Amino acid sequence: MTGYTMADSASADDVKVVILAGGQGTRFWPMSRTKKPKQFLSISQSGESLIQSTARRVLGLTTKDNFVVMTNIMHKGLINSHLPYARVICEPMIRNTAPSIGLAAIHLTQNDKDPVMLVLPADHAVSNEEGLLTALKEAVNCAAKSEVLVTLGIQPVVPHTGYGYIKKGKPLHGNAFNVGRFFEKPNHERAIKYFESGEFLWNSGMFAWRASTILKSIQKFMPELYDGLIRIKEVIGTAQEASVTSEVFEACESSSIDFGVLEHARNCAVIASAPFGWNDVGSWDAWAEHFDKDENGNLRYGDAVVIDGKNCVVHSQNRLIAVLGLSDLVVIDAGDAMLVCPRGRVQDVRKVVDELQRLKRAELI
């Protein structure tokens, strides 16, 4: 992969790292709850949370005072605890990534500024941090020099069905390509075709663009959201900011930036990155990949034993859990609630949260 130094790309002062930390992490129930979702949990023996890892990995791109975290007002205290140096912008309610990114952009364009926004999810894991940083530098460089919407694509290492895909278009420069098309998560047969063709990349959900560039695109493809964002911009720093922001978010459509903007735009570029051990940590199965297993493939986290079993994931919060004669099982104990399911069903854990909502068990959500 072609490497870039900061001298080759935007200056550190021109880069704003925007971390999206408003998600609920329902597939990580029962450890992930409304009051403390997945991004504040740890997947390392060091105890570093996912959001702390996300920020630390990119400190080489900018300075600490250029970090912005988009989150729910409920989590402002947690953000201040985990990333005390970051600026926190609170969303009044969850409306997916398009409104969140738009809100960040209008705040960052105050005083006629137009920084490069490096947009990162708060809850991903990476094993080769140098490889990630190299790819992100190229994305920032691309966004700084031209009016494009840059996404970071990763060369697939397996035909994964849990990720969206991007088909590479015309080569631009270095590892940058025009985006041919975005594709939703495929079934297994289609994922194999994508993988074998060599023309497709995993969509990492990491982006780079000038704040003005994404706002122009929102204006074109999501005009109602754009009008609301302009209303907010006019009252930033006044007594009306909170109420106007709430009104706009209440009325706006809940939409991802991919669906609302990128799938329609013609100025999208993708950086074709070599694999760098990226994982979106979307399930307990993915979480388990980051820990050492015993000789039978069992992960025992906390006070746990597995006897005559294989490939089990056992997480104990504060008491002994013993698994006997069972394999391919996930057992997660959070003290006041426990999850037990086959490893093949970990993607369905959010159904438990849906059922708890139906039962009005708010204390467990």
Image: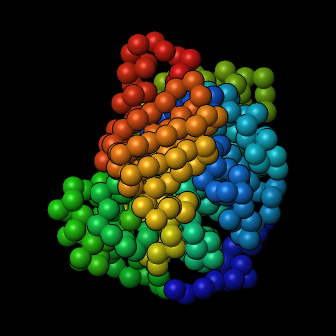
Residue at position x 78%, y 28% in the image: 238
- The colour mode here is rainbow
In the displayed structure image, the side of residue 63 where residue 28 appears, left or right: left
Q: Is residue 204 visible?
A: no
Q: Which of 212 and 302 lies nearest the eye of the viewer?
A: 302
Q: Is residue 192 visible?
A: yes
Residue at position x 52%, y 86% in the image: 1
Q: Is residue 35 above or below residue 52?
A: above
Q: Which of 273 and 159 lies nearest the eye of the viewer?
A: 159
Q: Position of residue 274 (x, y in %)?
A: 46, 78
Residue at position x 42%, y 61% in the image: 296
Q: Name which quarter of the figure residue 142 lies in.
A: bottom right
| Residue at the limit of the structure toward the left, as seen here | 189
Q: Position of residue 322 (x, y in %)?
A: 49, 40
Residue at position x 43%, y 70% in the image: 154
Figure label count: 0
Q: Position of residue 111 (x, y in %)?
A: 77, 49
Q: Position of residue 74 (x, y in %)?
A: 67, 28
Q: Is residue 346 above or below residue 241?
A: below
Q: Name which quarter of the figure residue 319 lies in.
A: top right
Q: Which of 78 and 113 lies nearest the eye of the viewer?
A: 78
